[in-house]
Every structure is written in C-alpha cells, then in structure tokens.
Image (tube, rainbow, N blue to C red):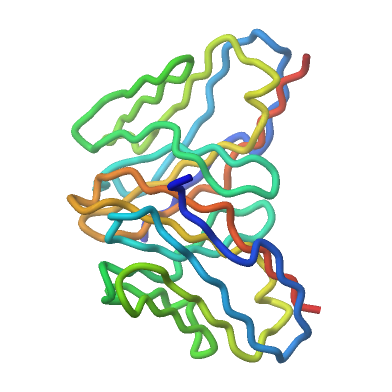
Amino acid sequence: DTGVSQDPRHKITKRGQNVTFRCDPISEHNRLYWYRQTLGQGPEFLTYFQNEAQLEKSRLLSDRFSAERPKGSFSTLEIQRTEQGDSAMYLCASSPPGPPGNTIYFGEGSWLTVV
Amino acid sequence: KQEVTQIPAALSVPEGENLVLNCSFTDSAIYNLQWFRQDPGKGLTSLLLIQSSQREQTSGRLNASLDKSSGRSTLYIAASQPGDSATYLCAVRAGSNYQLIWGAGTKLIIKP
C-alpha cells in the first residue's frame, strides 16, 4: 500500500504527558501537511512542509506543539504537556511536487484522547 | 478572512434519489476547491478537485460545480446508494498558500 500512513492510530494519555505522532507520506510526495480535527468540525491547518523545510505554521500551533521532517520523508508531530483541549484527530496529508492545485492525500488520522 | 460554510449540516434521503450538497465561501479569490468524503472515525478521501478556471468536474455519479463569482460550489450525487452515507466536506485553497480552509461538512445518510 502506498498511501499516507499514520502511527499510532489511537493514543490515550494523561494530562501533562508528551505525545508524538508519526506520518509517512506517499513516496515521492515532497509536500506534507498536518491538520487537526475535532468532532463535527472541518480540519484546521497546523503546519506545512516542503521537503524538510517547514514553510507554514498556523497561529493555532502553540509553543507546546512542534513538528519536524528531518530528511524530507517522514514527519513527527509532538505535543508537550498535553491538555484536555488537545483531544482531537490529528491528520497528516501529502501532495506531489508541482503547483498548489494538486490533489492532497490524507492518512487515516491519529486519535488523541487526553484524560 | 476566508470562511467556508456548508448547508445543510445533515441530510437524510431515501436510496435512489438525486441530491445536491452546498458549499459557500466568502472570498472569491480561490486557487481551487476540493470535495472530500469522510467515513466515521476515518481520514479524508478526495472526491473531486476543481481549479479556479474550471466550472465543473465529474467522476462517476458525482458532479461538482464551481461559481467563483457567487462564492458557491455544489456536489451533485446521482442515484444515491446506502454506501454513499458519509460526511462530505469542501475545502478551498486561497492563492499560492498551501493551506486548505474547510467547511464543517454535511453528514449524509442514505436510507435503504
């Protein structure tokens, strides 16, 4: 399967703990995105990478959030000192090189529950 | 600031009916508009992508139209089936920015 892969699919953590999600994009896709989605809402943009460079970052991303894509392939999203408001599905997506008009492909998401 | 609205929030129709889902956006300066499908607890699957220069796109029983001047897009589903039950979301890309701005979705239930 050559789709976008996310791990873990589900994570339950206690408030104050750190969590990390991993995303493996479709091979040869140089663009990678992280979004967050809560129940009944559309996704909210978090950050965007082109190769290893983080080119866009939402103001929604507080200092507790950090994303990396060190070799321009897989990416990690870390949330430090989790809060109950961080409970959501974290979606990763990728798209191929070319103009912004290319279709974007999403993974199955990583569910986070902070208790 | 671009805002995307989808009405209705939920729709339930009998199997076999043709139906239209609506998406509106406040800023007509978009790069493209994309319709996605989301099954419960799952990620998003791209259905149709319409570039700003296009008026419509078709894929099987799905047809999406775009009217930039009025800030509207519609997703037409022909001969609906129970397997079409899902949440349908539209998203716009503004200019060269790589962000997508999303509607909250329309939850569609097709009754057998």
Q: Position of residue A56 (x, y in %)?
A: 31, 72
Please state which of residues A2 and A41 is positioned toward the viewer in this rendering.
Answer: A2
Q: Position of residue A22 (x, y in %)?
A: 52, 70
In the figure, is residue B75 to the left or right of A79? left
Residue B108, quarter of picture? top right
The extreme front residue here reads A1
For the N terminus of chain B, the quadrant is bottom left
**Which residue is depicted at the point 25% across and 45% down?**
A101
Q: Position of residue B70 (x, y in %)?
A: 33, 34
Look at the picture and state if B84 lies above or below B37: above
In the figure, is residue A56 to the left or right of B62? left
Q: Position of residue B57 (x, y in %)?
A: 33, 24
For the C terminus of chain B, the quadrant is top right
Look at the picture and state if B70 lies above or below B97: above
In the figure, is residue B95 to the left or right of B1? left
Please state which of residues B66 and B71 is positioned toward the viewer in this rendering.
Answer: B66
**Which residue is depicted at the point 74% across and 71% down?**
A113
Look at the picture and state if A48 lies above or below B23: below
Please state which of residues A36 and B53 is positioned toward the viewer in this rendering.
Answer: A36
Counting labels gives 0
Residue A29, quarter of picture? bottom left
**Which residue is depicted at the point 59% across and 65% down?**
A7
**Which residue is depicted at the point 37% across and 56% down?**
A94
